[in-house]
Amino acid sequence: MDGGSVIERRRALKAAGAAACGVAALAACGDGTPQQVSGIKGKEIAKTADVPVGGGTVVKQYKIVVTQPSEGVFKAYSASCPHRGCAVSTPKDNVMTCPCHGSEFDAATGQATKGPASGSKLVAYEVKVQGDGIVVV
């Protein structure tokens, strides 16, 4: 076997390995296009007492972030950043931050205000308050 064949085979193996790693990374992070979780319509996803004004809570079971941007106004969004699918943080001062690449989202609109996800929005869920719970409509 000549040296050229060994080098070509190594290049091919490296390329295949890089492609496999790229696919694995996409599977782990998502493709940047989060979808709404199905089957949660009518379900209570949080208690109003657990969602502070100017903040919120992440409901890990459904990968949803629930916010209260102003007194009595509740919003819900996919917790998956549209850039690469990483989970955004619990809102603080009406801002949700993606820890992976630093994108920031407005808690009242879900609109990206900073970072590589600029121009994108988190997928929104319509919610209503029912008793002391927040329910997906």
Image (tube, helix red, strand yellow):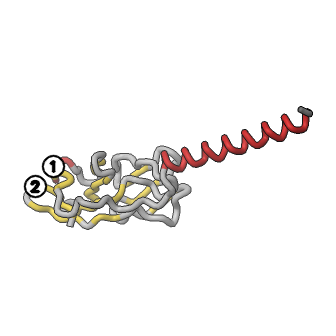
Dot 2 falls on a residue whose secondary structure is loop
Q: In the rendered structure, are the residues bearing label 2 and label 1 in contact, judged by CB atoms less than 8 Å apart?
A: yes
- Which tag, 2 or 1, sits closer to the chain's start? 1
At which x and y percent is residue 4?
Answer: 90, 38
Q: Residue under label 1, please give it.
A: 49
Q: Which mark is residue 91?
A: none
Toward the left, the furthest residue is 131
Say which quadrant the C terminus sits in. bottom left
Crowd class of label 2 (few under 14; some 14 to 19; many from 20; radius 10 Å): few
At which x and y percent is residue 36?
Answer: 34, 62
Residue closest to the eye, 86 or 99: 86
**Left/right of residue 97 with respect to residue 14 in the rendered view:** left
Q: Looking at the image, how many numbered discs can be counted on the residues?
A: 2
Crowd class of label 1 (few under 14; some 14 to 19; many from 20; radius 10 Å): few
**Left/right of residue 13 with respect to residue 63 in the rendered view:** right
Toward the front, the furthest residue is 1
Q: Residue under label 2, please give it.
A: 132
In this view, 106 is above or below 24:
below
Quarter location, residue 12: top right
